[in-house]
Image (cartoon, helix red, strand yellow):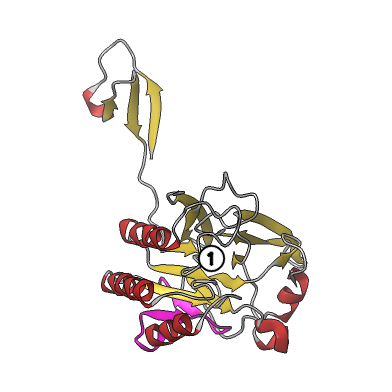
Amino acid sequence: MYELVEVKRNPVEANKARYETAANTQISRVGRPQVPEVSLLHVSDTHLGRPLTDKEHMGNANQLERFLDAVNLAVTFRVDGVILTGDIFDDDVDEATVKIVEEHVELLADAGTQIYYVRGNHGCDRGDAFLRSQTEAGRMIHLSNEPQLLGDGALALYGMDFDATANGLSNVAPAGDAPLDAYRLLACHEAVEPIARDGISIGELVDASEVELDALALGDLHKHKRAYIGDVYKDSGQRLRAFYAGATTGIARKSEEYEPAAWLLQITDGALERHRLPLRSR
């Protein structure tokens, strides 16, 4: 962490460890940022294989290029894992694209970065076969209601596929043992009321869950959105945090000015920080 101050006319004392810049400011180191126990990259709705002309506002952003942008960010920031919250592939994807994706999934695996995912409402046979093969190879983990523990138990990560609640929310809501002080994050590809219309009731999800969730990492909505949702835990008054990553390309309606991004999630001492990392818009 650094403090920016105006440059003084007098010379700076040698023991102050200050550094002058060309803009008449000084940078003074005041401390070291705390190293997170877990860092993740949240990416959603990559829609690999989607025709570029499918929607009026699609523009000329290329889904594969944005996916590769996200991979580069994961490598650059040396994250512990990548969370893909659904609609990784669209309703069709060619073999050449799948091959490129496979190469970059292997790159992340070689870098020690695990990929976690949930299924969305879009997909295809070729994409589903790829997800199965990568899951069997251990390069990708399909999230479920049982926790994946990261950072020596600092994070308990859960997942729900799109429409998983059709057979009853209690059957797919987070369950299983996790450290008491773990940050509990649920990844899912769903609209969640009241952030989005006609979605899962947040109250019903909390009631069905066997664990006290801290946050939801969401997909499906193609624009960034976040909120604190009520006092969902009446005893503690704790509010549930929920956030959509948005799509990696401008495929939402009226999205001419949309700026795609991935999101860096850093967990330290039971607290979550979330930082926007822009992707190229074209």
Say which element carries label 1. Answer: loop
Q: Say what amino acid the circle numbered 1 marks.
A: Asp
Considering only vertical position in the picture, is 125 above or below 78?
below
Crowding around mark 1 (Cα neighbors within 10 Å: few <14, some 14 to 19, many 20+) is many
Image quarter hosting the N terminus: top left
Residue that protrudes farthest toward the front in the picture: 53
Considering only vertical position in the picture, is 80 above or below 224?
below
Residue that protrudes farthest toward the top in the picture: 9
Residue that protrudes farthest toward the left in the picture: 14
Q: Name the residue rendered at 61%, 76% in the picture.
A: 121
Considering only vertical position in the picture, is 15 above or below 75?
above
* Quarter occupied by residue 29: top left
| Residue 264 rendering spot, x and y as whole percentages | 46, 57
| Residue 20 rendering spot, x and y as whole percentages | 27, 23
| Residue 220 rendering spot, x and y as whole percentages | 61, 66
**Residue 152 seen by the camera:** no
* Quarter occupied by residue 203: bottom right
* Quarter occupied by residue 209: bottom right
**Which is more toward the observer, 157 or 196?**
196
Q: Name the residue rendered at 28%, 28% in the picture.
A: 18
- What stretch of residues is rendered in magenta? 135-152
Horizontal placement of 206 versus 261: left or right? right
Horizontal placement of 135 versus 218: left or right? left
